[in-house]
Amino acid sequence: MNVTNDPGQPDFLPPFLPRLLLVDDEPRLLSSLYELLRDRQYQLVTATCGVEALEELDRQRFDLVLLDLRLPDMSGHEIMDIINAKAMDCDVIVMSGEVGIEAAIGALKRGAYDYLRKPYSREELLKTVENALQQRRLAVDNQSIAERLENSEKMYRYLVDSSPDIIYTLDHDGNFTFINDRAYQVLGYAREELLGRHYTMLVHDEDLNPARYAFKHGEPRASRSVELRLKCKTGSVGSDRTFNNTLMTIPLKALGMEGQTSALLGTYGVARDITDRKRAEEMISYQAYHDILTDLPNRMLFKDRLGLAVIQAKRKETELAVMFVDLDRFKLVNDTLGHVKGDELLQQAAQRLKDCLRRGDTLARQGGDEFTIVLPELRDRSDAKAIADKFLETLQKPFDLDGHIVHISASIGIAVYPNDGENIDELLRHADIAMYQVKALGKNGHAFYHDSMLDISHQKIALEQALRRALENGELEMYYQPQVDVATGRIIGAEGLMRWNHPQRGLLSAGEFLPFAEENGLMLPLSDWMLDALCRDVLLWNQAGGDAIRLSLNLSPQYLDRGDFFEKMRGALTRYGISPAQIEVEITENICIRNPQYAIDQLNKLCQLGVSVAIDDFGTGYSSLAYLHRFPIHTIKIDQSFVKEIHDENGHYPVILAIISIARGLGLHLVAEGVETGTQARYLEANGCTTMQGYLYHRPISLASFLDVLRAQAQTLLELQGREPAANIHAARA
Ligand code: C2E
Ligand code: CA
Ligand code: CA
């Protein structure tokens, strides 16, 4: 019987009022129970038998059942069994008139909230009902608190586990007491593998000391940082990652984590993976200290290492050597073959130098084609000399630049600590000066620094400035070295060679100042001047009867490069009214390599004009013979170095013979340079080279002297023409 709609109770009872089921088969007792509870804030439902009670329990949820034990159709115990079996969430207060203790125990065993003996007092019943309901309310509250707690715990877990950093706690002994999931993602260790284990199992062996220090020493609650490499589980080499660890010593008590009294302190740590940043930083600092092209230490790192080496040498009272290595002819390769090949040459050269060094030596690229080396702990100077010799030897072997075979050499200057300098800068400067000395004395060698070199390097600077002035002050002059046809004994040509009347140092030959001019961009104004001077002089030759004598002029690569050489040449010839047929341009083989087509064009235009072309220093350059076919060439000049080899008239000098046969095969005119002895002259003539230039016949001479020679020759010829022609040769040779 549902009594909820009883007129005594308002319909609008709020739904959260506790709902009670009153079960008793005695109508009088049931209604008195009902009367007793009706004015309170309960929803009341009544049942008079077991079946009815069970129906009500199935129909709706009750907070409390007031249950009579003895019912006509079943016992109260049976009803409770069903309530328990169905896990109904309601409390039961059992009321019974039975005296036996078993009934009470049976009820309480089944989970009854309380047991009331009939007849109960009104107060007793009300109090028991109220207590039961109160306890339920508490239980519900507790439940929701527990749920909220669980949720918030989940929330923290989530926040901690999805943190980008590894978060952990250690106990007093350094064992993991907590670690978040991140450890697994980053290091590959599952939580269970770490919990209870000592933190050192994760730390890279080399970082154990700083780790121990950081984990041990810390003021409670003050945070400190340490950078550590941690080991990944995969264990593969190089799989370490670097972490920035922020640590804090924490009193475990404060966290409610207190264990035994000995474990009062623990460590809370956050490890942030900074591997990528580290790698980027390492990369940047590597690049800041290394040369990208050769991968060698750069100037900065070199100074650093040299500084350390000096300190060590000072402490140990040993010597050390600093070397300055400059590649000879690198600029030429770079200019002629281009930067790509130039770079490759530098890389190969760097590798060769590196292969000559011992452990502990530092090789660095100073820039351009300059390398520096520090050799610490020198036993004596011969150590440094041995390495310099090795350098020279290894660099002398040909370089293969993608099929272009190139020969270079090096100039090496050496300064030794402490004799040649006590600090980095002094040592470097003096090694540099020694290197320049080698350059000035013909390159391809090494020299130890000596104080006397200081003057020489000062002289060099002075020379550059003076050369600029020389142009303005008219101190330059063209000299002429005759070329003799030994078959007739006649001068058939002359090479123009520049001379400098130095106000203090006297007459300087071209070899003494033109290399500096090339380095300092003075070659262009000098060549302009030369062209003009030559033309003026040729006019005088012609007046002296030398109009059949051909002038050879040296064309500097820089000048041909400029692009308007042809125009300048033509302009000058026209201006002075000189026949192009009287002019020959001497170029070196190297000129043809850089931009062959351009060179060919320029030289072709010259040829069309009537100027002829000679290859100077033939055999020393590295252009291939193939160019000879593509070039409008008329003359080959055998380089002096080959001629110097000739010591025996009946000897065999294959290079000379080869050059002679090349010239013959291509129908070219041949001139031997630097002929100094009769032996050389006779060997050359016997093998078919009849035009000679060298000290044996004439040194380079001033214009005035050359004009005298020309006049004399013209005079002789005139006189000879008056006599019988057969005497010509004899007279001219005399
Ligand atoms: P190069 O063209 O090979 O000139 C020949 C060099 O050998 C000259 O040196 C000459 O004086 C020297 N010589 C001639 N005969 C003998 C000999 O029998 N024995 C020895 N040992 N040497 C001999 P120089 O005048 O010092 O010229 C050196 C280089 O400077 C020349 O080599 C040439 O490449 C360049 N040069 C000279 N004058 C000029 C110039 O007016 N313009 C340009 N662009 N370059 C020049
Ligand atoms: Ca020449
Ligand atoms: Ca020459």
Image (tube, grey):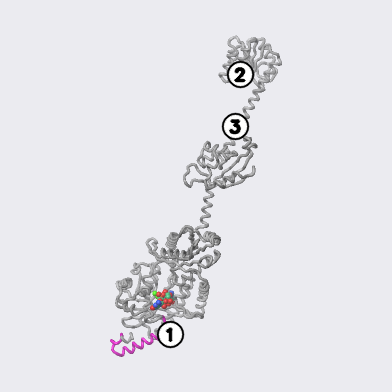
Disc 2 marks which residue?
A: 111
Give the side of residue 61 with respect to residue 721, left or right.
right
Task: Provide the secondary structure element on which disc 2 rests.
Answer: loop
Can you say which quadrant of the picture contains the C terminus?
bottom left
The percent position of residue 110, horizontal first and vertical second, equals 59, 17
Q: Secondary structure at mark 1?
A: helix
**Amino acid at circle 1:** Ala
Q: Quadrant of ligand 3?
A: bottom left
- In three-dimensional space, the C-alpha distance between marks 1 and 2, rounded to whole angstroms, equals 141 Å
Q: Residue at x 59, y 38 (%)?
A: 171
Element assignment for label 3: helix
Position of 466 compared to 613: left or right?
right
In the rendering, which numbered label is found on residue 150?
3
* Neighbourhood count class around disc 3 (C-alpha, 10 Å): few under 14, some 14–19, many 20 upward: few
Comes first in the chain, label 2 or label 3: 2
Mark 1 → mark 3, Cα distance in angstroms: 114 Å
Q: Say if residue 553 shows up in the picture.
A: no
Instruction: Give the extent of the magenta segment.
Output: 700-729
Amino acid on which disc 3 is placed: Glu
Q: Which residue type carries mark 2?
A: Gly
Label 1 beta carbon less than 8 Å to ligand 1: no
Marks 1 and 3 close (CB-CB < 8 Å): no
Residue under pointer 1 = 704
**Up-down: is 69 above or below 491?**
above
